[in-house]
Image: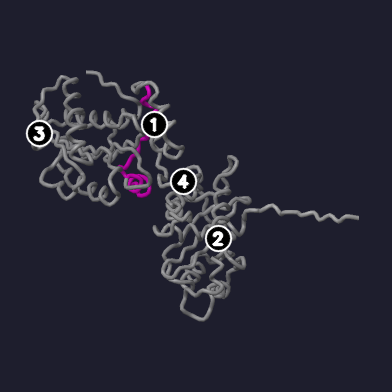
Amino acid sequence: MRVELTAPQYDFVTAADRFPAMVAGFGAGKTHAAVTRALALKLQYPKQSVAYYLPTYDLVTTIAFPRFMETLEAWGLPYKQNKNDKILHVENAGSVIFRTMDAPERIIGYEVADSLVDELDTLPEDKARTAWNKIIARNRQKKPDGSANTVGVATTPEGFRFVYDRWVRNGGPGYRIIKASTLSNAANLPDGYIDSLRATYPSQLLAAYLDGEFVNLVAGSVYPEFDRAKNASSERIEPSEPLHVGMDFNVGRMSAVIHVLRGDDPHAVMEHTGVLDTPAMAALLRKRYEGHKVIVYPDASGASRKSNNASESDLAVLRQAGFSVRANPSNPRVKDLVLAMNKMIHSEGVRRYRVNPAGCPDLVESMEKQAYDKHGEPDKAGGLDHVVDAAGYFMAYRYPIRKPATVIKLGFAA
């Protein structure tokens, strides 16, 4: 028996990792890979069961059941189907159990050795997380060779949702991503299919639906060119070097982003978020960065607004802590702050602004996710604004958008 697979499909089907995820564009063959992996595991462990999950009952009946039966027939494997319980019994090779994820609380009452999850990222993030936890709990049949139980995921990336959060932002041992572009499966697609995708979707959606990339799918990303890999930094704080600290004032949610300079290029290397107030932030910075010259670029409103319920302004508190404070008389326009950030993130093929994702995880997430609201302003409802505003005050002060001066020539008649 010979099964034709693309390179990403092969990597997914044969992955020994506990939690491999094939993150794929449209038409990249993720369902074919998921079905193949499920049946390969079934044949490898005939006395154990495999579960296959889809978002809805309709997808089980119209997609999964027919695809599995078609594959079993092509492989010459006899089977019986139980339509009521949604189970396929493969002769001499145990069962494939089908379940939906639209009601995660119903994922109970059975055990399997391995699972496959199709289109996990199409679920709302909270529901996907609940379903994932329930699916893992079902994976407890012991394998005869002692190998680990696995849960494989095959999905189209739907922005920064559950799959991104679990596999990228909080990835750990056993969590592996296998990217699959639509182009990798071009030989098996109808003529014109890829061209139709390019003609239908804007560039940002093409990155997700053609290349299988995680991108902000909310209309109007504030920082559309930011890329956690392309803008990544591995820089760390060197002994005694000056630190440039962007700071945003919010009672109970103060944020500071620590930058170092390499040449004249800024690298965000550490962040402090959720700090109570200005005195607490000043004490934290003074203790943590003793021996460094600390230059703070704060929210200019701190000259008058109090975040400390005391008579001192926020800026005075920072100065009394021994920090150098550089603030404009008023905050830059939001548009100018965003333009300053975006110019440094990527302009004319150059990426000057770099972020260490290990030291600044919240900043990376905010720059990836923040979108414009219905009024055309950077969204503040999702709580993504504080840390990115902190970085922005530094950027707008040190690397402002320079506006050309308008020169008016006055002429007088002789």
Q: Quadrant of the N terminus?
A: top left
How far apart are the two marked residues, 3 and 4, measured between alpha carbons?
46 Å
How far apart are the two marked residues, 3 and 1, measured between alpha carbons?
34 Å
Tag 2, which secondary structure? helix
Residue 359 in sight in this render:
no
Tag 4, which secondary structure? loop
Label 3: how many Cα within 10 Å (few below 14, some 14–19, many 20+): few
Instruction: Please indicate whether residue 407 sits to the left or right of residue 367 in the image.
Output: right
Instruction: Please indicate whether residue 212 sits to the left or right of residue 117 in the image.
Output: right
Three-letter code, disc 4: Arg
Q: Tell me where the magenta segment starts and ends, as one range.
A: 163-186
Relative image position of residue 43 (x, y in whole percent): 16, 28
Looking at the rendered structure, which numbered label has been put on residue 83?
Answer: 3
Q: Is residue 176 magenta?
A: yes
Front-lying residue, 284 or 106: 106
Residue placed under numbered mark 1 in the picture:
181
